Amino acid sequence: MKNKDFRKLLMVLACIVVVSMAMVSHHADHTRQSLALGKMNQAWRTDTAHKKQTKKVAKKAAKASKDTTNYTITGLLTDEQGHGMEGVVVSDGYTCVLTDTAGHYTLLRNKQARFVYYSVPAYCEVPVHADNDRTAYFYQPVEANKKVYDFKLKRLPEGKERRYKMIVIGDPQVTNAINPYYTSPDDNPVKKSDIERFTAQTMKDIRKTIQAMPNGTAVYGLSMGDDVQYYGGYNPRLEREIRRALGSSQMRLFSVIGNHDQDGNALYKRKWEDSWGPTDYSFNRGDEHYVCINNVQFTRHKSYYSPGELTAAQVKWLEQDLALTPRSMKVVLCYHIPFTFGNSPYGKAHPLDIAKEKGHYISSRLSMLLGLLERFEGGYELFCGHTHFALNHEINYQGRHIMEHCHAAACGNIWQSNINICGTPNGYYVYTFEDTRLTDCYYKGTFWNASRQMTLFRADTDFNGDSYVNDWNLPKNRGVLVANVFNADSRWRVIAIEDGEEHHMKRIASKGQDAFAAGYHHKYAKCAPYSFVSKANGYLIMNHLYYYEPKNPKANIIVEATDPYGHVFTATSGEVVTNAFYNYAHYYANERK
């Protein structure tokens, strides 16, 4: 081969190698590009799938969290003619706002709120659930995705009431159990459920009391809590049954929530709310602003603090509610557990500085509450239940004289008798308010005549091992007369009249028991422990017992009790109770009529 031809061959081979190498390089680049593109595509697909999955999860989470997220709600309050209701307080239990001139409101709903509701104005009717269920219905449950809550109010034909009655019921406390109920001094209990007794006794008597009022009397009701107690096991019907019973009269009725309505159990509290609505709310009647608030705070062990307490959120709500209330009004603060005494205190509670009530404490919130309430020109009243004994508790605190009205229980000793552990009969209270004045109040024992406001005993009488002589260190064998004046306080005048001469009876005010009630329950209490009514109960404070040592033990003595409203009630020594199974406390003849 010639050199010339050889060089040509080398050049061709070189070109082939170059082209081949280029092709290989291009293929490698293409492969790398393809791999890179594949990885990018895979990454995009993975990221897209992740985003889709995240979006899907977020969507589900958002849907699930709609009721647990703060968001703005609005609404309109109008009367029956469609006119806007100006200046009405609307709340979710955390924030309070006023409606504007057109009746509109805007509210940032708290994520924990269960209700939207308004404070019933004094010039409007209290709305009720139904004609045959006259329990108050001023609220709407919060619903998912719902952001508009309108309300229609009905104006009172004559406008704001200047005068009205308020019937206050302490602790209905119906249970699932059939509690022993005796109608004679034997061991044969009548088998009646608690709800049967409450309906046929308490509510029947309330209806009679209302019927006896003058035509046109405005009358309202307030239950002081412990509407139910799931004693004997959970009963889903119990709340419905007690609301039906409480709503069965002509009074329009509100309720506070008690410790047994909750018992530290979320289900129980929710059932109460399902029946009654919010636990912290307010309403107006006449010149009174009523605030109902849940002061039952449970510890980790599900017991509760006594005296009552409030959370910081509740204090904030209360401050807002009262800030929107005209200062000219009277405030009636309503709650279940007393604020002025108790012996299971929160750590910041203060010892009660009364020697005869040693072991009791004052709520850590009392000073703050009084500071809020004292701003009102119409004054204030403190209403509670819980105790199962009647007590107008009076204390001197930080330079103030305070009276807390602790209402006796409608159920007495949890439906085991017809008496409370202080000897006060099962019953309820009838208040009269006129303008900003509390012009009358009396205790109405179930099936008792309203004029009967006391029972009398001889101090030496033995009631199944209990006697006033021993319990209260009174003179023995001297015919000492003891009067149990159910609704008494320091303003009452209680005298004994012997041979035409008046003598002031001495008032007992201390921890201790009522000998008659303790003696009765000593024998007949079957469910609640006897310690509840005995000397072992360090919670019980008695301050409505009065005694007189007669000059002649055999003299006919008249006891005359005059209340702060000018009513005079009398009883005579011939009416003294001598039997531990005294008729009034156990058998209601009128129940059969």
Image (cartoon, rainbow, N blue to C red):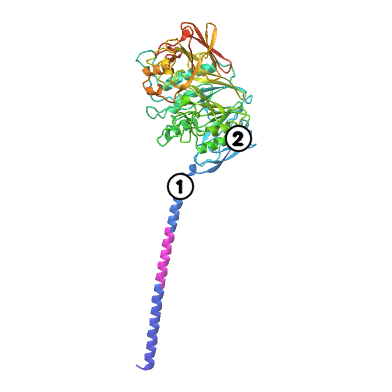
Number of callouts: 2
Residue 105: percent from left, percent from top: 60, 38
* Magenta segment main secondary structure: helix
Q: Is residue 217 one of those drawn in magenta?
A: no
Is residue 355 rendered to the left or right of residue 8?
right
Residue 65: percent from left, percent from top: 47, 44
Residue drawn at point x = 38 percent, y = 90 percent: 7
Is residue 470 rendered to the left or right of residue 314?
left
The answer to whether any part of residue 542 appears in the image is no
The answer to whether 368 is drawn above or below residue 389 in the figure is below
Q: Using the image as rendered, state which of residue 154 and residue 224 is in the foreground.
A: 224
Q: Quadrant of the N terminus?
A: bottom left
Residue 399 falls in image quadrant: top right
Residue 303 falls in image quadrant: top left
Any mark on residue 324, and which?
Answer: 2
Q: Residue furthest bottom?
A: 2
- For discs 2 and 1, the disc positioned in front in the rendered view: 2
Residue drawn at point x = 39 percent, y = 70 percent: 31
Callout 2: 10 Å neighbours few (<14), some, many (20+)? Answer: some
Amino acid type at image mark 1: Ala
Q: Secondary structure at mark 1?
A: helix
Range covered by the magenta-colored residues:
29-46
Q: Which residue is mark 1?
A: 61
Residue 437: percent from left, percent from top: 60, 23
Q: Is residue 35 one of those drawn in magenta?
A: yes
Q: Secondary structure at mark 2?
A: loop
Q: Using the image as rendered, state which of residue 16 and residue 147 is in the foreground.
A: 147
Whole-Å distance between the Cαs marked 2 and 1?
37 Å
Q: Using the image as rendered, state which of residue 383 and residue 339 is in the foreground.
A: 339
